[in-house]
Amino acid sequence: MQVVREPDQAYRGGTSGVKYLFRGPRIDWGVILFAPGEQLGRHLHKEVEETFYFVEGAGGRFLLNDKEYPIAAGTAFRVEPGEVHNIVNDTPAPLKAVFMKSPYLPKDKVDV
């Protein structure tokens, strides 16, 4: 068993960005905080399925294969391998999501 406290972990970008809670051996998962004006970056995964569940914020945009979906706390998005996706926070408030990626393939991301 592993136990991790989210407040004890650091965001990759300092005050925002990705914060992994578990990395492998079968899944990646953690939280991601988008400060106002930040975005994830347009990408896809060749083999990995990725799920985002928004726990804070509203009004950002989830982009999937050139379609746009509004973001609100309580909304989840599951992205299949090969689907191009991005998250854009064009609001004045932060957006926070829990994310899960499976299987654990850390080099599977392809920027597009």
Image (cartoon, grey):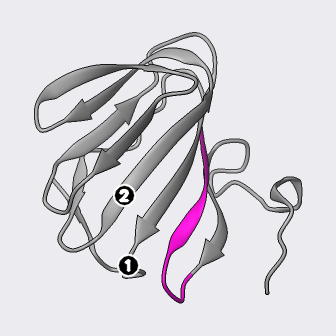
Q: Mark 2 to mark 1: distance in Å?
A: 9 Å
The residue at 31%/63% (across/down) is: 49
- 52 is higher (above) or lower (below) than 54: below
Give the residues in magenta: 24-34
Label the magenta part by its dominant secondary structure. Answer: strand
Left or right, 75 with respect to 63, comes to: right
The residue at 29%/70% (across/down) is: 48
The residue at 46%/23% (across/down) is: 89
Can residue 55 be seen in the rendering of this structure?
yes
- 85 is higher (above) or lower (below) than 72: below
Q: Nearer the viewer, residue 56 or 37?
A: 56
Q: Secondary structure at mark 2?
A: strand
Q: How many marks?
A: 2
- 109 is higher (above) or lower (below) than 79: below
Q: Nearer the viewer, residue 102 or 87?
A: 102
Left or right, 43 with respect to 82, comes to: right
* Residue 33: % across, % down: 62, 39
- 109 is higher (above) or lower (below) than 88: below
Q: Residues within 10 Å of mark 1 (few under 14, many from 20)?
A: some
Q: Residues within 10 Å of mark 2 (few under 14, many from 20)?
A: many
Task: Inspect the image, locate mark 1, and give the three-letter code of the amino acid beneath it.
Answer: Pro
Residue topped by disc 1: 103
The residue at 77%/59% (across/down) is: 10
Residue topped by disc 2: 50
Can residue 34 be seen in the rendering of this structure?
no
Looking at the image, tell me whether mark 2 or mark 1 is earlier in sequence order. 2
Q: Secondary structure at mark 1?
A: loop
In magenta segment, residue 19: no
Asked which quadrant contains residue 4, the reply is bottom right
Task: Inspect the image, locate mark 2, and give the three-letter code of the amino acid beneath it.
Answer: Glu
